[in-house]
Each structure stands twice: as structure tokens, then as C-alpha cells.
Amino acid sequence: MTNETPLPPRQHQYRRRRHRWWHWVLGLLFLGAIGAGVWGWHAWHVARQEFSATYRALPSKPSDTTLTSGKPFAVLLLGTDTGALGRHDVGRTDTMIVATINPRQQTAELTSIPRDTLVNIWGSQQDDEKINAA
């Protein structure tokens, strides 16, 4: 025999309701954790596919001796303005960088050209224009 006194009926129901409430909270937290894990895996998988597609090696041409000769070469990188916020001057370059690659020394140098550099543009009516207008 135990010395415990039975609980009144109302107190017993209150304990059961509180117990059910914690089950719901733990269940929702568990489902949220599973959902976050699935979303994280999906985001990682999509990013991995995009990166592998972006940096896929291109087939080399045997006739292209510029890259295989080992001589330094330069590439002009341009970033253009999209004309957002209602502007109508679409297509001006905001970023100009000359990348010089030296395969023998395994170095790369980046030289930024300021967009406000004044230049003479052939065929233009103005004497000096900003280089990003070219």
C-alpha cells in the first residue's frame, strides 16, 4: 500500500493538459529543425551545382598557342551599369580592371582604371570625355 492520496479530478486534468502542451511544443521544434535541415541541404546542393557549372574547365584548342606559350597576357574586365532607378543611360562601364597574367611566374596583377579618367574618343565632338562614356 502506498501513502499517496489521490488527486482531485480537476488537478489531474490540469497536469495532463500541461503535459500535452509540452508535447506540441517539442513536436513543432522537431519539425522546424527537420525543415531547416532540409532547406540547408537543398541550398548547399544547389550552390554546389552552380559552382561546378561555373568553373567547369573548357576544352583547350590545339591551335590556340596564346595561353599555352607561357607568355604573359592581359584581359580587360568591364562591369556595366544596369540603368536602375529610372535612369536612361544604360551600358556605361562602372568598373574597368586590366588583369595581367604571367603563367611562368604564376602571378596575376590587377590594375583598376578610374571611370573618371579623361580620354580623347575618336569621332566624338568633345575634346575630353570620361573613359566610362567610351
Image (spheres, helix red, strand yellow):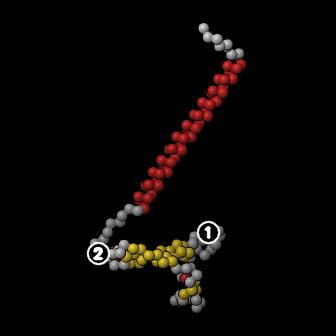
Q: Residue furthest top?
A: 1
Report the amino acid beneath label 2.
Ser
Q: Which quadrant of the rendered structure holds the C terminus?
A: bottom right
68 or 104, nearer to the observer: 104
60 or 110, nearer to the observer: 110
Residue 64 visible at all: no
Query: Of the numbered discs in the image, which one, if any, rests on residue 127?
Result: none
Residue in view at x 65 percent, y 13 percent = 4
Check disc 1: other Cα within 10 Å, few if <14, some if 14-19, many if 20+.
Answer: few
Q: Secondary structure at mark 2?
A: loop
Residues tagged 2 and 1 counted as in contact (Cβ below 8 A): no
| Residue 95 x %, y % | 53, 74
The picture quadrant where one finds residue 5 is top right
Residue in view at x 63 percent, y 27 percent = 19
Q: Which quadrant of the rendered structure holds the N terminus?
A: top right
| Residue 79 x %, y % | 52, 72
Residue in view at x 62 percent, y 31 percent = 22
Q: Secondary structure at mark 1?
A: loop
Residue topped by disc 2: 63
| Residue 83 x %, y % | 60, 71
The picture quadrant where one finds residue 7 is top right
The picture quadrant where one finds residue 107 is bottom left
Residue topped by disc 1: 84
In the displayed structure, 134 sits above or below 108; it is below
Residue in view at x 49 percent, y 76 percent = 97
Report the amino acid beneath label 1.
Ala
Residue 131 visible at all: yes
Q: Left or right: 101 with respect to 13?
A: left
| Residue 14 x %, y % | 69, 23
In the displayed structure, 47 sits above or below 109; it is above
